[in-house]
Image: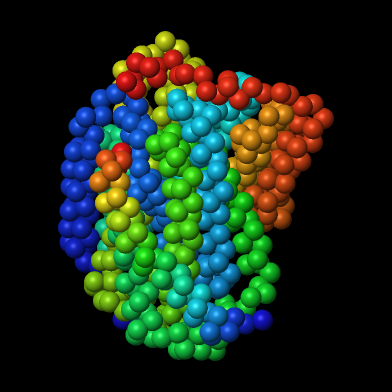
């Protein structure tokens, strides 16, 4: 069992698994969404999500296919620092915990991160922010859609277009039927699947191979992977840290959760999610380091995780990996569809196109936009252009430039609009320049540094006294939908 | 500087212990929220 072909499941098994889980998610989506007729119920799960579901949804959404597949790949390519660097993605969740509490406190009736930027900094900053946020959301959607098609093909032999279409259709289906409640409910099950699958594979690697053999074989064949002073890996660590913080701070995926959690849950849920997420890339990465000891021939680094699982467990291992990948993809795709749809409904449809839209209009628009986003993602994924999948990497500079406008805007009364706009525009430009001039590993770092300079210096030079009460203004629709 | 075997083992074992405890903790919290009628 030493080639990638042995890791591939029979397509009929692949189809059976996809069909079974598709039916399960759709049925759960319908069941949980059958009473979600009001806008708040549909887009924010009624704003009463508890700690268990809140923690699981934050954790599962952050475990993307990148975590389950790229963490082993990074460990295989840059060693221990790859595992630890990826693990620092949890810092974004941990740092968002106080922000989630503040967001819920200041904006009890808010819907989107766009709402915050519009009220806090005005229309120019809001539109710059929306451009960044929508660009990032689309990049993430396309990268997940393409990853779905590619991974399902690699694991089962099912053609790329079929796999990509199935994963998108399922996620659109249950998100459409059940709204945010379906997203959060399925995220809980998906989190359990990912965690249990990972533990089984790692325990088997330890039992069958052992730490001694794994460490000795890596030291003999790839000693650089155990080197704690690998410069490129240390740069990756810092860049990944800032990229992750930027992704979480600005994206409506995380803001919509902060709005949906019941009072007092946000801080605990994000803290716990960060603590439980941190070890996942380390365990997933460790599995990859078993390759030299297992004497596997790895033709493609991104298949290292499934190959080890299949070597240790045979067909069962490949099934386990397929379930984990399917769960990781679904938990991120459904969250993106739901959070992006309410961002488009609130910040584009209602604030730009139809200011007098009723709650019912917005509820219908949210459903249509979920379908529209699914179709758009499918159209962008269909040509299978790898350059599109790489779109997400470009967004590092953009999202990192939003860290300071958001953090300062939430906690620093004097932060001003011009400084926030300059931070986002100049930070993005500088980050993008450094991406091409130096490398991907500095884009987020430069973007965040320039943005910090703009926000801090600009706000100190021309401070503005912001009244926090403005953020608590009741949403015009809130009374009619939240009773 | 190579990461020594004991440090490497402890790092992985701690990560694995947390990952093993995570689903149990989530289920315990789920039951607690359900009993308090605070699921969602």
| Residue at the image point whose x is 47% and y is 22% from the top | A348
Taking the image as shown, residue A257 lies to the left or right of residue A8, namely right
| Residue at the image point whose x is 64% and y is 49% from the top | A444
Which quarter of the rendering shows the N terminus of chain A? bottom left
Residue A260, by quadrant, is top left
The one of A3 and A34 positioned closer to us in this rendering: A34
Q: Position of residue A5 (x, y in %)?
A: 31, 73
| Residue at the image point whose x is 67% and y is 74% from the top | A229
Instruction: Spot the residue most to the front.
Output: B36
| Residue at the image point whose x is 51% and y is 89% from the top | A216
Which quarter of the rendering shows the C terminus of chain A? top left
Q: Position of residue A262 (x, y in %)?
A: 39, 36
Q: How is the image coloured?
A: rainbow
The one of A185 and A197 positioned closer to us in this rendering: A185
Camera sees residue A144:
no
Q: Is residue A131 above or below residue A391?
A: above
Q: Position of residue B10 (x, y in %)?
A: 50, 78
Camera sees residue A96:
yes
Q: Is residue B28 above or below residue A398?
A: below
Taking the image as shown, residue A389 lies to the left or right of residue A227, namely left
Q: Position of residue A201 (x, y in %)?
A: 34, 73
The one of A140 and A391 positioned closer to us in this rendering: A140
């Amino acid at each position: 069992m030493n080639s990638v072909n042995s890791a591939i499941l029979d397509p009929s098994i692949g189809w059976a698994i996809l069909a079974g889980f598709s039916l399960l998610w759709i049925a759960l989506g319908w069941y949980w969404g059958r009473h979600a007729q009001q806008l708040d119920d549909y887009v924010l799960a009624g704003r009463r999500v508890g700690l268990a579901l809140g923690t699981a949804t934050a954790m599962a959404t952050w475990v993307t296919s990148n975590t389950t597949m790229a963490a082993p790949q990074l460990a295989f390519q840059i060693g221990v620092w790859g595992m630890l660097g990826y693990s620092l993605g949890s810092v974004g969740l941990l740092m968002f915990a106080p922000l989630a509490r503040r967001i819920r406190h200041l904006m009890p009736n808010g819907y989107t991160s766009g709402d915050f930027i519009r009220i806090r900094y005005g229309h120019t900053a809001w539109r710059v922010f929306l451009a960044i946020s929508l660009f990032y959301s689309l990049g993430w959607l396309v990268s997940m859609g393409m990853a779905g098609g590619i991974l399902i093909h690699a694991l089962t032999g099912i053609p790329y277009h079929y796999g990509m279409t199935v994963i998108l259709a399922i996620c659109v289906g249950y998100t459409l039927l059940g709204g945010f409640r379906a997203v959060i409910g399925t995220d809980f099950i998906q989190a359990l699947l990912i965690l249990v699958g990972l533990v089984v594979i790692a325990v088997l690697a330890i039992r069958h191979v052992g730490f001694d053999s794994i460490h000795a074989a890596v030291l003999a064949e790839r000693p650089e992977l155990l080197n704690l002073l690998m410069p490129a890996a240390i740069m990756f660590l810092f860049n990944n840290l800032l990229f992750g913080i930027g992704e979480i701070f600005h994206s409506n995926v995380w803001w919509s959760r902060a709005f949906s959690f019941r009072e007092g849950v946000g801080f605990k849920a994000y803290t716990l999610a960060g603590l439980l997420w941190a070890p996942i890339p380390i365990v997933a990465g460790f599995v990859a380091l078993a390759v030299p000891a297992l004497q596997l021939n790895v033709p493609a680094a991104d298949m290292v995780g499934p190959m080890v699982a299949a070597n240790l467990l045979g067909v069962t291992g490949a099934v386990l990996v397929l379930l984990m990948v399917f769960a990781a993809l679904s938990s991120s795709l459904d969250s993106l569809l739901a959070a992006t749809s309410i961002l488009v409904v609130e910040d584009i449809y209602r604030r730009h196109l139809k200011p007098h839209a009723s709650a019912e209009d917005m509820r219908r628009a949210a459903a249509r936009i979920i379908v529209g986003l699914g179709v758009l993602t499918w159209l962008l994924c269909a040509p299978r252009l790898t350059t599109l999948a790489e779109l997400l990497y470009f967004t590092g500079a953009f999202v990192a430039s939003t860290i300071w406008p958001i953090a300062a805007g939430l906690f620093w009364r004097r932060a001003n609009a011009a400084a926030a706009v300059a931070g986002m525009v100049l930070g993005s430009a500088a980050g993008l320049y450094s991406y091409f001039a130096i490398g991907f590993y500095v884009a987020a770092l430069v973007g965040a540094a320039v943005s910090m300079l703009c926000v801090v210096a600009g706000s100190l030079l021309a401070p503005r006294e912001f009244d926090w009460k403005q953020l608590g203004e009741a949403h015009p629709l809130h009374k009619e939908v939240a009773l | 500087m190579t990461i020594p075997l004991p440090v490497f083992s402890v790092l992985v074992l701690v990560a694995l212990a947390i990952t093993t405890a995570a689903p149990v903790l989530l289920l315990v919290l789920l039951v607690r929220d359900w009993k308090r009628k605070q699921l969602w």
